Structures are given as structure tokens and as C-alpha cells.
Amino acid sequence: MRKHIFNAGPCKLSDRTLENTAKAVLELGNSGQSIMEVSHRGKDFEAILADTVALFKEILEIPEGYSVLFLGGGASLQFCMIPYNFMKTKAMYINTGTWATAAVKEAKLWGEVVEVSSKDREFKYIPKGYTVPADVDYLHITTNNTIKGTELLKDLDVNVPLIADMSSDIMSRKVDVSKYAMIYGGAQKNLGPAGVTFVIIKDEYLQKVVDRPIPTMLKYSTHIEGGSMYNTPPCINIFALRETLYWIKEMGGLDAMNKLADERANYLYNAIDKSKVFVGTVDKEDRSRMNICFVPKDEYKHLEEDFVKFASARGIVGIKGHRSVGGYRASTYNACTMEDVKALVEAMKDFEKEHAK
């Protein structure tokens, strides 16, 4: 029996993704080879890669003049590549959590970082009302905080190149890609298995690459010119990502994903807000729809582990909060169903009946 999966990444994937990838592991089409065996230079995989790029552009409505890449190294490698390529003297970073902090750390190796942060309140809100200096090389944002549970749900209007880490909310809503110089993220939150990173980059932005020696593998131009195949790409991961994109399209595209995200989040947050035992952890106006964080109220702190075990006995997995914050985190990515969310809420209510004073 399939469990109710709330893992933060790797995440729950659609049945289509799992079933078709499993078939391809045994044999890709009628090739007589597994997806893990085919040559990345052969026609079978080249067709898969081209199809994946086309689907990505279609579903996200990426305008002309942008390239889509599938790379290795995770979003964490992008933390280094971005300033290495584009930071001449100074960049601005909106620091909204652990992964934004990691991006800031890498950027400081290359120049001055103008940082606006919500660290003063443990990243429980999205900073607002700041001014973007006209002389920064770019503005970097992280649209969703997977650990603390905040999310930026609008596309910013700024007069400098805008770069966004959208690892954990990509393909959950429509995005005006034209406002961004670059969007990137690991696939393991909303798109596929861990091991492949997507990069959407404006072609003319490559003219802004800083004049300094950059290792070949760390140049975006290398991967654009090589069509994501300068080195051997993660073939099976790209195949699985493609199957997820087909599933999103079949489900009704980003309008459908956005509607489902609202439904899942509203249902769970409503239960948290009405609970006698549990309480949310971030400002309501900045709550994430992808990573819903909550903790036991003070008088029930001693029951924190008990609820994890209680939920696990009901087939609910992945709700334990990140080791740095504790509590609970329900990651309600695209493939998470209302059935999953309702099972979690039912467990919360039954646990409350047993323990509420």
C-alpha cells in the first residue's frame, strides 16, 4: 500500500512518473536497452532531452530568448556558479532561510553582498519594503523556504537582473519568466528524483559574464553550447522529470497545479489554526503552500515525537521537521493529493482527542 508521503525532497512523485520510469529501467521503448544503459549521444536519449526542454518551455510559457538546461550538482552548485559568472563587484541577496544563507555565503567569495534578511525573527516572514540599489550586478531571491515554511508568491519588479532559486515551488504556479535573468533549482522537490538541476537563463544575460578565468564546467555558455550534454547528463533523472511534465500537462497545467496547491494548503492550515494542540510557526501572510510547518503548543511540547509515531502508524511519512528547527513539516508538493492531506488532518484531530486538555 502506498504511504501518504510528505518528504521535503526527494519528494512524492506522480504514479505516471514512477510507472513509466520503472518500465524504462527495464527497457526504453523497444530499444532493447534500459534508460540507464542507452548512450546519451544516441537518438533515443537525444529525443527525450529535446522533448523535456520543449515541455518545460511550453508549460512554464518561457518566452523566446531563454535557454533551458539540465545539469548536475544541485542548486547548491548554482550558489557558486552564479556569482562566479555574474558578480563583478556587488550583488543583493534577500535572505529568507537556510538555503538563501548558503547562497549568500558563496557570493561573499566574489564581492560585496547587500543582504536583506528575516533572520531577526528566525526567518518567519518574507522581508518587504526594501530598496534595491541601482549599482548591484543582480538581485538574488529564494522563492520558497523549505525549512521554515515561507513563500514569495509574486514576481518582483526590479531594475536589475533578477535571479531566483525556485527549487521547491517551480511548476506549482504560473511565473512571468520575462522578469527574470535566471531561474534555477533542484528537481527533487516538485519535478523528479534528486540528481538533476534545471536552469532557465536569458541568452542575452550571458553578455554580462564577468571577465575573469572561469573553469569550463562552471560556465553557463559551456552547457548552452553543449545542449546540456557537455558531459554525460543524468539520463534517468531527466526521463523521470519529463514524465512529471507530461503528468502536469495532463492534469491541466499550472492553473491546475496552482488550484491544487491552494486547496491542500488551505485545508491543512485551517486544521492547524483550529487545533488545540498544534500551532503554525510563520506569519500567516507569508505561509508557504509547499512546506507547511507547525509545532506542538508549549503545553504539548513533550508529545512532539509521539505525534510522529502516531502518524507513522497510519502510513503518514516525512512530517518530522528539519533537524535544525524540530516540530513538523508537511511538504505538499505537486504530486501530494488531497487524500494525503486529509489523512494527516484526520491523524491530527484524533491525536488531539487523545491528548487535548
Image (cartoon, rainbow, N blue to C red):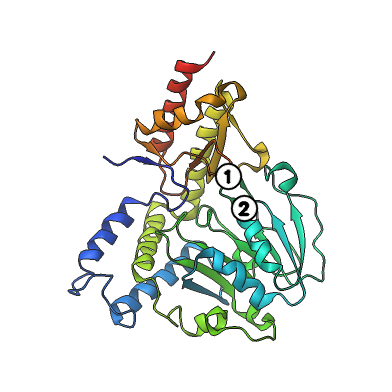
In the picture provided, is 231 more to the left or to the right than 201? left
Please tell me in which quadrant of the rendered image residue 42 appears: bottom left
Q: Which residue is mark 2?
A: 98
Q: Residue at x 66, y 72 (%)?
A: 83
> 19 or 50, which is in the foreground?
19
- Mark 2 Cα shell of 10 Å, populated few (<14), some (14-19), many (≥20): some
In percent of width and height, residue 306 lies at 45, 27
Secondary structure under tag 2 reads: helix
Mark identifier at residue 324: 1
Q: Is label 2 in contact with label 1 (beta carbons under 8 Å)?
A: yes
The Cα atoms of the two marked residues, 2 and 1, are separated by 10 Å
In percent of width and height, residue 349 lies at 46, 22
> 48 or 209, which is in the foreground?
209
Dot placed on the residue nearer the N-terminal end, 2 or 1 = 2
Q: Residue furthest top?
A: 357
Secondary structure under tag 1 reads: loop
> 224 or 276, which is in the foreground?
276
Three-letter residue code for mark 2: Thr
Above or below, 307 relative to 9: above
Q: Residue at x 53, y 58 (%)?
A: 167
In percent of width and height, residue 328 lies at 52, 36
Three-letter residue code for mark 1: Ser
